[in-house]
Amino acid sequence: MKILAIESSCDETAAAVVCDDKNPQKRIFSNVISSQIELHAKYGGVVPEYAARQHLDAIDGVVNKALATANVSLDDVDAIAATAGPGLIGGLLVGTVAAKTIAFMKNKPFIGINHLEGHLLTVRLCYDVEFPFLLLLASGGHFIFAEILEVGKYKILGETLDDAAGEAFDKVAKMLGFEYPGGPSIEKYAKLGDKNRFKYALPMQRRPGCDASFSGIKTATKIHIESIPGMSNKDKCDVAASFQNIIVRSITRQIEKAYEAMHSNPKNVVLAGGVAANLALREAISNFAKKNGLTFFVPPVKLCSDNAAMIGWCAIERLKAGYSYSSLDFKTIPRWPINKIA
Ligand code: KG4
Ligand code: ZN
């Protein structure tokens, strides 16, 4: 089975051709990403209307490049997949309309994919990871602990009550005047800083359950920054290191509670989403896994952030699990939690 997939839910226009080869190394024929980072960097965040226009400009070239790199034509693919949500409505419309148009023209089936499901199944594109597993999905817009029982059967254990972790990274980077996107910048400068210099209270300690909260950490960071007029580069690195450290500590504390709340008996813990690129977080979750006798899996860094290979792979997993194609009037769903995937 060969799928042409499109991803355009946020600030990357991406297309890929993937197949269901038994060997994970042979599954991705092409994975093309046109990033909008330069466009949004000057605003310090994604401007939805500009993003939509840029998707429209880039989509044809990206799809053609994905086909050419994979050395396949539209006649060779079995189906066209596209992210149908959650995400920014303009980008979702560009990607799904492009996919549906190709599907209609070529008389091929179309399948609308949930972006978060794409992130959470990416690990199975890369490795043989068995269900059930404990998932932490941390991206720019989402922060979720979930029990992943099988394809399409996802139970949310806890979520952020305010900002997503990636969003907190982006906002704090902006406060420090670091370049966009903020996560990689904070990680880079944190390496040079003292993580124990600024003190924080660990959030959510007295609250039952494993929900998370990052806005208090963000506000505390703002207060730390305001307490040092004319910050030096060293001060900024210390803030970045202390901020990253409390975020990682807080996530590690909450994932323990998420694990306790699971009803199944997982052997694996999986980290997914853009924030999964963060090495300090990877190390902390890896330690948590060791402590609890779990095996830790995380996709390679370039498959953690938004890409279309994950959307194509998700389509393959769904079809193999017996879920059907989508009709051409399948609507985009800008808000679409993982426990509401039909
Ligand atoms: O999954 P993703 O590419 O897009 C969304 O679906 O949101 O995640 C992007 C988020 C951004 O907030 C970005 O700052 C964060 O992931 N991120 C990181 C790192 N790399 C990307 N956060 C922390 N450390 C990183 N190395
Ligand atoms: Zn994403």
Image: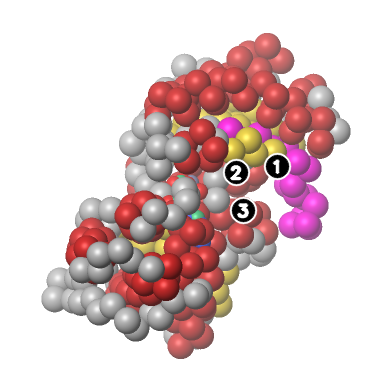
Q: Residue at x 57, y 69 (%)?
A: 297
Q: Quadrant of residue 232?
A: bottom left
Q: Amino acid at mark 3?
A: Leu
Read off the residue under disc 2.
Answer: 307
Q: Nearer the viewer, residue 290 or 108?
A: 290
In the image, what residue type sits under mark 2? Asn
Q: Is residue 220 magenta?
A: no
Callout 3 crowding tier (Cα within 10 Å): few <14, some 14–19, many ≥20: many
Q: Residue furthest front?
A: 230
* Numbered range of the magenta stretch: 13-30
Residue at x-position 63% and y-position 35%:
34
Query: Dots 3 and 2: beta carbons under 8 Å?
Result: yes
Residue 36 visible somewhere in the drawing: yes
Which dot marks residue 303? 3
The stretch drawn in magenta includes residue 18: yes
Q: Which mark is residue 31?
A: 1
Q: Give the CA separation, mark 2 to mark 1.
A: 7 Å
- Quarter of the figure with the C terminus: top left
Q: Earlier in the sequence, mark 3 or mark 1?
A: 1
